[in-house]
Image: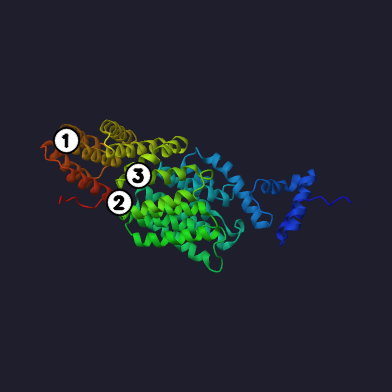
Amino acid sequence: MEHEHLDQDSLSRLLAVDRTEDQNRSLLHQLAICPQCYRIGGYVLDLHRAGHLPLNFGVVDVELARSRAEAPALWECVRRLPQSRRISLAQGRNPFLSWGFCELLCRTSRSLAGQDPEQAVEIAELAVQVAEGLSEENAAEERWLYQLRSLAWAHLGNARRVRGDMPAAESDFGASDQWWDAGDEGTGDALGYRPVILDLKASLRIDQRRFADARKLLGEAHDLYIEAGDFHLAGRVLLNQAHAQLENHEIDEAISLLQKAGGLIDPEREPRLLLCARHNLLDHLSKAGRFAEARVLLPQVQELSEFAGSRLDHVRLRWVEARIDAGLGEAGRARDAFSEARQGFLDQGIAYDAALVSLEFAVFLLQDGRTDKVRELAAEMIPIFQSQEIHREALAALAVFQAAAVLDSATVELAREVAAFLDQARHDPGLRFRTA
């Protein structure tokens, strides 16, 4: 007997009621065998076949999956537009007021934050605009919409943190907390946003040197991912936990966490995340003086960097290579690597890291008895860094080292003291440099 063909109203009525898996199988079969029905609801079948829609779907699942599947095309439409035009498109009633588009913008902002903080801020601002523009009639559930807004504000706070605007980042996370509290009552975390927000907020707490708060947030995020069975994202949280341990001068604990993280991360799901885990492990091993272990790991990190790394990743890896070569007594290789890393940071306008490489290079040269080279290196520091964005106190610290080098009185201890100050003052420009 011929079945009754679907139209848009009948499909909407079918999806609006609570459905069993057997009913959904029957609907999918009808869409697969009937071209006329497929023209009306084929997108449901396509979403299921693509793995975006589980068999126990309802109307909310279908709308969310469709929104997420359409989001990349929306991003392509606005990716090259100026920010003012993007914002105007995200106002009013139009396709850009999309749940999946907002989620995609959040992910894109986070992925760009380390390489292009300004662009990451703009994309997160657009995510906030989309989330705020969505109304309850566009949302899966009203309180889910509040949680989406919390997610968007957290990503804006993260982008502003990376850009160095700590007061604005704190304010953004305050807005995120307010939206989450409004949406959490009796709702739970149906969309899995909570551990993402906790992880991002922990990064702010680390930069604020509030390590106890960061560890608490990260522990909660890790447990939520494990509970959900997402071991890959649990590994991502361990990377942040390791960063907190390192910033708190607990390097052995950081190394242990990174070793665990490497076993959880799925390289096919996120190749760059595995690169970050392995690179950070390599970096921490070299800083802990475990140079032989670092040398064994180095080829793997080099291979990952070739596959998933950016130009800046290669510069940072060259810096670690210099440290390993120096630690293993390979002086010529170390000099070349330090020089290349330093120039690489200068070429990209990253003056702070260029200064830190210069000081580490100076330590190596002083230990090698090359005070003449230290004088040359120090003489180049101030003019170069005055033309870059290094704040006054950091320049003052570098000037102290330069003056000592000119007088042949620079020491390993002074170079390390200035480097430690620069590292700490990166997040606290008001810090004053005082020699011991």
User: Which of 116/397 is in front?
Assistant: 397
Q: Secondary structure at mark 2?
A: loop
- Quick one: label 3 or label 2, which is nearer the N terminus? 3
Q: Residue at x 52, y 64 (%)?
A: 183
Q: Residues within 10 Å of mark 3 (few under 14, many from 20)?
A: many
Disc 3 marks which amino acid?
A: Asp
The answer to whether residue 63 of the structure is visible from this angle is yes
The residue furthest right is: 1
Q: Residue at x 81, y 50 (%)?
A: 5
According to the image, label 1 marks what residue?
369
Q: Considering only vertical position in the picture, is 410 above or below 91?
A: above
Q: Residues within 10 Å of mark 2 (few under 14, many from 20)?
A: some
Q: Position of residue 78 (x, y in %)?
A: 53, 41
Q: Position of residue 197 (x, y in %)?
A: 46, 57
According to the image, label 2 marks what residue?
427
User: Which of 249/294 is in front?
Assistant: 294
- Quick one: label 1 or label 3, which is nearer the N terminus? 3
Q: Which mark is residue 72?
A: none
**Alpha carbon separation for disc pair 1 and 3:** 25 Å
CB atoms of marks 3 and 2 within 8 Å:
no
User: Which of 306/117 is in front?
Assistant: 306
- Quick one: label 2 or label 1, which is nearer the N terminus? 1
| Residue 300, quarter of picture | top left
According to the image, label 3 marks what residue?
283
Disc 2 marks which amino acid?
A: His
Q: Secondary structure at mark 3?
A: helix
Q: Position of residue 330 (x, y in %)?
A: 28, 34
Q: Residue at x 29, y 48 (%)?
A: 426
Q: Residue at x 55, y 65 (%)?
A: 188
